Image (cartoon, grey):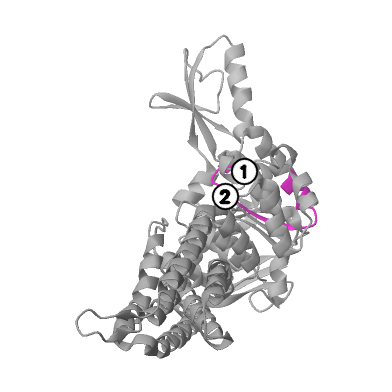
Amino acid sequence: MDISKQVFRRSARMGLSYVVLSLLMGVFLTTSLNIAATIGNVSSADNGNSVPLGPMLGLLVVPMGALVGLVITTPVYLLFVNDKNAGVLEYLLAVGMDQRDVFLGYLKAGVMLSLVAMVPVVLINTAFMSGGLGPALLGGALVLGTGVSDVALVTIMMTAFSSMQRRPTGMNSPLGITIGVLFLIPELLLLSVLGTQVVWVEGGMAVALLIAAVFFLLSLGKLIKREKLLP
Amino acid sequence: MLTMTDVSSGYDTNEVLHSINLEVSKPAIYVVLGPNGAGKTTLFRTIAGVLKPTSGGVMLDGRDLYAANELRHEIGYLSHYPALPEEMTVAKALAFYGGIEHGDVQAAIDSIGLRELMMKKVSDLSQGQKKRASIAKLFLRERKLYLMDEPTSNLDPVVAKEVRDMLLGLSRDRFVLYSSHNLYEAQEIADYIVLIKNGTVGFFGTKDELRTGGYRIGIKASANLAALLPNGKQEKEYFVVPVSGPQEVGEVVKKIVAAGIAVHEVKEIGNPLEDLFTGSQG
């Protein structure tokens, strides 16, 4: 049994404002960062050395793309809490799903929803990016890799956290965005230190987040007992 | 046939059911009674597969309920909660579960006359309407076993009777486990009574096997009733009369009124089902 498509549709309908907001954010951030990047290199006023500001601004698209992915998935956590309180999750267990099926359904919905916001980011970035298909593909892969991994990890953490609360109220949903942004901070800080070499950090972060998400998902059956999904 | 063998179950480290043994072999209505916190809901959740027992096993038609996932479709489970997605209309909520259970949405709608509620949002329904919509989802498929955790709570008397009649019809060839706090309702529809006490089965048998004749009513009237009701006696401020059941109360009152005596108050003094709860029987 796979409930991810229903969860995806329900989350998008319930959180339409999040969907619109994240799409606008994605388009605005990507466009403005790319316009800034096309300005090119800027000379330092101190010694006249050239700083490759353009490519660095272009790389900011990666964490920003992940951020819009996080914003758009907030309704998924809210829906999880609503469904738990209404007894929907209890009924899903009764019809034969186990707790991992339930979490996986919400996780897949979160990832699908994040793609709705991140794909336009990738397309706009690709359209702007100069230097051929290689950098464009690398940029797109980094945005999607970092974004999907971050969203997956945060979705698992937030649904698991909500299920462990005795009285889940949904008030912790913005916490998901905060946690997701925390994972992106190393990329932002290292960008100013490493310059364009930060692509290796971004790639590494994407892999690390993905491994953490898969580990949590596989552990959920043992970490979260069935009764944690009851109202 | 439903068989529970030495089933213990609960939440985290809190074991609520202790070594439950129960065999439900005949299609009928089995009313599960017990005081609050006795373990009725935990019993239903365990049979429904929502909770897995910490020990023992539950078999349906000789097959392990937790090993054979397809058996879950043979069980219809109505919990305390509506279990309906709040943002959906009733029609969409039933279609949502119909998709998951491969069920017949139209059959569910017709089962409890939901047509007028179909386009209403679940969040806009009254508690009673939510209960009706929630009951309907049990009829998305044919089931062998129906687990109804207080199905008539929040329902008006007319719909409650409709639900009871529906369950009576089902019980001709299906197993219906029905929990209730309403002792008179239990007396009215039960074929068998299962009493849960402190997480164990305190009594399991037919309604008739319960000690009967234990109903006593206390009457305050404008005159002494000793001559009119020779089987009664004065106990403090009430004249206490034993009756066979709630249905006899009206006849007693009519007899007093017919004798020209005014009835000021009628109060239930003893009820054998309540005695089961409090521990003086069973």
| Quarter of the view holding residue B63 | bottom right
Q: Is residue B66 magenta?
A: no
What residue does disc 2 label?
B86
Q: Give coordinates of residue A149: x percent, y percent.
A: 48, 79
Which residue corresponds to the image point at 44% horizontal and 75% vertical from the top-left? A38
**With A60 as the anchor, is B227 left or right in this view?**
right
State yes or no: discs 1 and 2 in contact (Cβ < 8 Å). yes
Say if residue A120 shows up in the picture.
yes
Q: Which residue is situated farthest in the left direction here?
A: A46
Q: Give coordinates of residue A29: x percent, y percent.
A: 44, 66
Q: Secondary structure at mark 1?
A: loop
Which residue corresponds to the image point at 39% horizontal and 63% vertical from the top-left? A165
What residue does disc 1 label?
B121
Which residue corresponds to the image point at 56% horizontal and 68% vertical from the top-left? A120
Q: Is residue B182 magenta?
A: yes
Q: Secondary structure at mark 2?
A: loop
Say if residue B190 shows up in the picture.
no
Q: Give coordinates of residue B179: x percent, y percent.
A: 59, 52
Circles 1 and 2 on the same chain: yes
Query: What kind of residue is marked 2?
Result: Glu
**Chain part drawn in magenta:** B166-186
Q: Is residue A85 above or below residue B188?
A: below
**With B36 as the anchor, is B32 left or right in this view?**
right
| Quarter of the view holding residue A113 | bottom right
Earlier along the polypeptide chain: callout 1 or callout 2?
2
**Which chain does tag 2 point to?**
B
**With A190 as the anchor, is A100 left or right in this view?**
right
For label 2, the crowd category at 10 Å Cα-Cα, with few meaning under 14, some 14 to 19 and many 20 or more, is: many
